[in-house]
Amino acid sequence: MTLQKKPSVPSHIQKLTPYVAGKTIAEVKETYKPKQISKLASNENRLGFSPAVSEAVKDALKEIQDYPDPIARKLKQAIAEKNAVTPNEVLVAAGSESIISILCRTFLEKESECVTADATFVGFFVQAGVMGATIKKVPVTDRYKFDVDGMLAAIDENTKMVYIANPNNPTGTYLDKEEFQKLVDGVPDDVLLMADEAYFEFAKGVDDYPQALDYRTDNMVILRTFSKAYGLAGFRIGYCIANEELITQMMKTKLTFEPTATAQAAALAAYGDDEFLQKGIDVVEGGKKDLYRFFDEQKVEYMPSISNSVMMILENEQKAVDFTQAMLEEGVILRRINAFGLPNCVRITIGLDNEMQHFKESFLKVKEEILV
Amino acid sequence: MTLQKKPSVPSHIQKLTPYVAGKTIAEVKETYKPKQISKLASNENRLGFSPAVSEAVKDALKEIQDYPDPIARKLKQAIAEKNAVTPNEVLVAAGSESIISILCRTFLEKESECVTADATFVGFFVQAGVMGATIKKVPVTDRYKFDVDGMLAAIDENTKMVYIANPNNPTGTYLDKEEFQKLVDGVPDDVLLMADEAYFEFAKGVDDYPQALDYRTDNMVILRTFSKAYGLAGFRIGYCIANEELITQMMKTKLTFEPTATAQAAALAAYGDDEFLQKGIDVVEGGKKDLYRFFDEQKVEYMPSISNSVMMILENEQKAVDFTQAMLEEGVILRRINAFGLPNCVRITIGLDNEMQHFKESFLKVKEEILV
């Protein structure tokens, strides 16, 4: 046998774990034949999306043979207006994952250093890893919050980027106004501060929740998405707000024609429908209160959340594995968050009443065997 | 005035030129008020797209609040079947631009070396540039073809990647079977050979056109797209075929949820409609013959093409600038290809009869002033 040489990948790519897709709804149906399926795994909007979207997409479809507007003029204008910034301070791309990737491609090199928590959005870990950057993961506090003092202490002259999600994913916790101000003040001017506000719309009504826009600095990038409260995850579209000079640099690495033409049209329509947005927020608020009550009764440890998911804290990783699997067999799809740094926790998206009912009934069915 | 420090970008990013968006149809209308607009700039399918697409998108829309299938199972299966490969040898992503970016992120590092031509798809120049790779651009032949001998001679121990587009964009020229075989044989096993077949469907009927699939090696990646012959540019979707091990590495850098759910549904529907595909190819064939005749009469230098565009060769860059602008004012949007390495050339997408008529009439109007 001869050893054939092959195209090789850099060591930092070799080290990355390839994505393993979860079971699709069709596969869950086929494998476990549950009576009902409740997809509470990906923090999507279980209410769906604004009815205005369908018409907008139908319209956009008429010219779908043409490339999309590379700078999403109309949507950018609408976002700028609603946030009282200029269109040049806005960049629209294919979802937060893409914006994180763009930021990593623009600002990081191999061996660049980033600071974040050990329990936060896995997408940042992955995209920084693709660039071969090293990540200092500062442990979250015992209340699963970003440790501001710890993170500031971890910043040194090699640090290029600090990442936080506020509210945090998957914990649902948040930095309050005082803590956020401390972070903003402490991050040096030449370090990029990424404030991922994917769950902004669910959080913005909370009294001491700091909207990053109110704390803007020239080194801050604020990330938002249409995948969560707006219910457009399938379209892949999000935006960020930052200093115009940062946006200009990011435009160099953004894929020319992201996001798609239908996504731009859908987002613009959804962005104008405050009524649907509020309905979705109300569903989540009601669902969370009810779930807290249920968990309190059942003596389940969990973190109160200001996003659209609630994190259960189990005794150990094995229980998290077994519980998620048992629930899956009942048709309730939940998310293990070991990749997010929390192997003994499970994340539950707040769904509609019938889905939450399904969750509770299934929980009661499996708890004896798994949780006790 | 104090000098404030800012987040800095690596020097290879600083050197990149930010994308400058062309005028939208709406802007052209407003600025020049032409009677008709013919968009012959971006090699889109002027016939549109398969009628099967609308229904498929309407269906996909029902679950658009959910994230897309990250591995595009159904579409991948259909592509695998049609090309007689296994699904594990196929990767679906957000258009060829994204696949090129994925390949660069997976296989290149700063200072990695690539070999290609000086006149080819600008998307490769940009994405390799984003990674800080250096590109050896081997001059095309006097017939605007990839110079196989020159490219093979340019490969050395630092070369990680060789890029060709076949047919080439923007020239419309191609490597024939013998030349392609020579290239495949000459590229070392440990160098990735990217064969970009974005215009495959227009070319595959040409006698001595080599379909890369017939020449497969373990170091070859074949890129195809739904943006051209299938008329789905607005959806951003394409695929590549390669050895399973290469696909596994690429899956590590692909954005988890690209391409979108509607794009997957649309592509699957379009992929099954051979009748529409053939119609579009026929339009292009007829349009090219007619345009060649016109150019011969008008004594315009051009390159015969096996893709869906034809390249005009003008005397110098200024004439290319002036001609493109004069045609724009008549409502005919063409593409200058200076960024592709050909400052004195202009690319014309083959459109429908009325669009080509508009092109010819406008040409006759502006030629005295500009071209003579």
Image: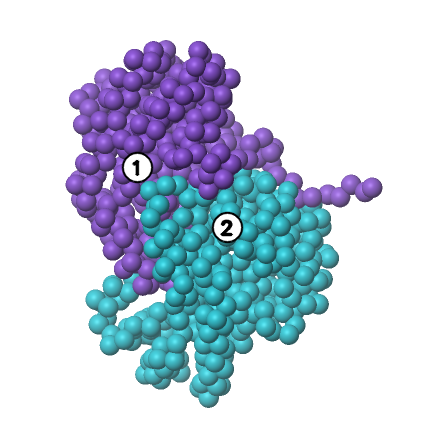
Chain colours: A purple, B cyan
Give the residue type that dot 2 points to: Lys
Q: Considering only vertical position in the picture, is A32 above or below B74?
A: above
- Classify the position of the C terminus of chain B by image quarter: bottom left
- Asked whether the viewer can see residue B262, the reply is yes
Q: Considering only vertical position in the picture, is A95 above or below A156?
A: below
Q: Nearer the viewer, residue B33 or B139?
A: B33
Q: Mark 2 highlights which residue? A: B74
Q: Residue at x 64, y 60 (%)?
A: B212
Q: Could you tell whether A3 is left or right of B250 in the image?
A: right
Image coordinates of residue A160 in percent, x first then y, are 42, 28
Give the residue type that dot 1 points to: Asn
Image coordinates of residue A43 in percent, x first then y, are 35, 33
Image coordinates of residue B144 in percent, x first then y, are 57, 69
Q: Nearer the viewer, residue B231 or A166?
A: B231
Q: Mark 1 highlights which residue? A: A45
- Classify the position of the N terminus of chain B by image quarter: top left
> Dot 2 lies on which element?
helix
State the image quarter where residue A304 is shown: top left
